[in-house]
Amino acid sequence: MTTAPVTIGEAARVTGVSAKMIRYYEETGLVAPAARTPGGYRLYGPSDLHALRFIRRSRDLGFSVEDIRTLLALWRDRGRASAEVKAVALEHVADLRRRIAALEGMTRTLSRLAETCGGNAHPDCPILDDLAGDDQPTAASPNRGFRPARH
Amino acid sequence: MTTAPVTIGEAARVTGVSAKMIRYYEETGLVAPAARTPGGYRLYGPSDLHALRFIRRSRDLGFSVEDIRTLLALWRDRGRASAEVKAVALEHVADLRRRIAALEGMTRTLSRLAETCGGNAHPDCPILDDLAGDDQPTAASPNRGFRPARH
DNA sequence: GTGGGGCTTCCCACGGTGGGAAGGTCAAGG
DNA sequence: CCTTGACCTTCCCACCGTGGGAAGCCCCAC
């Protein structure tokens, strides 16, 4: 039984990539345009599903779509050197560590502020005063420009 | 010398919030509409600059604009209870910790993969195979839905 | 042949941020 | 007083990755 091609909804179900995003990836050239039924429905064979799973997994690991473009190229290139792949991965690891450090800086500053805040009914919480404070850079400042997503 | 009001460019310079963003914050009601010169230029007095610094500082600490809306309301409310402020801060700390955990999961998985990759000229790097692998969830999977920003 | 679920394309939104065009304002210098 | 050039105004567009929804077509079962 050579697994028959499936439509986009089924592909979404089995790969965990939403139909919307599958179309988006096609539109932006991350995946090749899917085959179509005479009626215009997109069809996905096993290797397409494989690629979609690859993408989802990479997104899970925090790779940007651009990163994935690189990884996919390496994946498809049979003669690829593992060194290149490793480099991409390690660079991403470094990037992740930078982000973690940034978040930890924020956490530290904020926890410290919260500790000094009574947490009672009086309006004397120093958090606000610190936030309003005149521009003395603190632990979090080196991370300017970083914005976390999906609060 | 009662510090005279400044125009938006100067305000941007001294607060570290870009002119674009200052206008955006005004538009979205995060800050009150600025006073204007007869010619229509926005003017910012000391307390406006204070508020802008408050916002920038909060952004640095990873607060969303919505969070800041809350914090600003608490700040302006003289009778605010410090407990509320503390609660907002602590919730944000918890959120930051969740994000850190997510990123650490990715880092762990990816480092492990990179370790097992020769990093030589041969096309046998297991990273790609793992990425392509058939959908076994790994350490990073619990964090689905999280996307880091500004890679 | 009809109903309803799936598919198609298209546009809009989000959060924050930047870029840039077309035009008005302001202050300094001649 | 007038020109120059820096600054300001509003307005629209873009990014990324994702979801929502409308209008309309397709496919299958009954």
Image: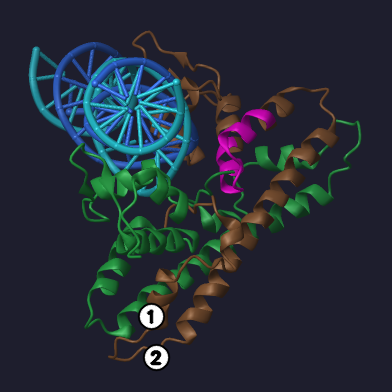
Chain colours: A brown, B green, C cyan, D blue
Where residue B35 appears, as percent x and y from the top left, is 21, 50
Looking at numbered disc 1 in the image, what kind of residue is underneath it?
A: Lys
Q: Which residue is mark 1?
A: B86
Foreground residue among C9 and B38: B38
Location of the C terminus of chain A (image quadrant): bottom left
Residue occupying image coordinates x 56% and y 43%: A59
Residue A65 within the segment the image draws in magenta? yes
Foreground residue among B61 and B31: B31
Location of the N terminus of chain A (image quadrant): top right
The correct choice, above or below, for A8 with respect to A60 in the image is above
Residue B137 within the segment the image draws in magenta? no
Residue occupying image coordinates x 76% and y 53%: B111
Dot 2 crowding, Cα within 10 Å, few <14, some 14–19, many 20+:
some
Q: Which residue is mark 2?
A: A118
What secondary structure do most residues of the magenta stretch adopt? helix
Segment tinted magenta in the rendering: A55-70
Q: Quadrant of residue B68?
A: bottom left
Where residue A4 appears, as percent x and y from the top left, is 51, 23
Foreground residue among D20 and A48: D20
Looking at numbered disc 2 in the image, what kind of residue is underneath it?
A: Gly
Where residue B110 appears, as percent x and y from the top left, is 71, 51
* SS under mark 2: loop
Residues beneath discs 1 and 2 located on the same chain: no
Chain identity of mark 1: B
- Left or right of B33: which side holds A95? right
Dot 1 crowding, Cα within 10 Å, few <14, some 14–19, many 20+:
many
Where residue B46 appears, as percent x and y from the top left, is 33, 62
The correct choice, above or below, for A14 with respect to A110 in the image is above
* SS under mark 1: helix
Q: Which mark is residue A50?
A: none
Q: Quadrant of residue A120?
A: bottom left
Residue occupying image coordinates x 82% and y 38%: B125
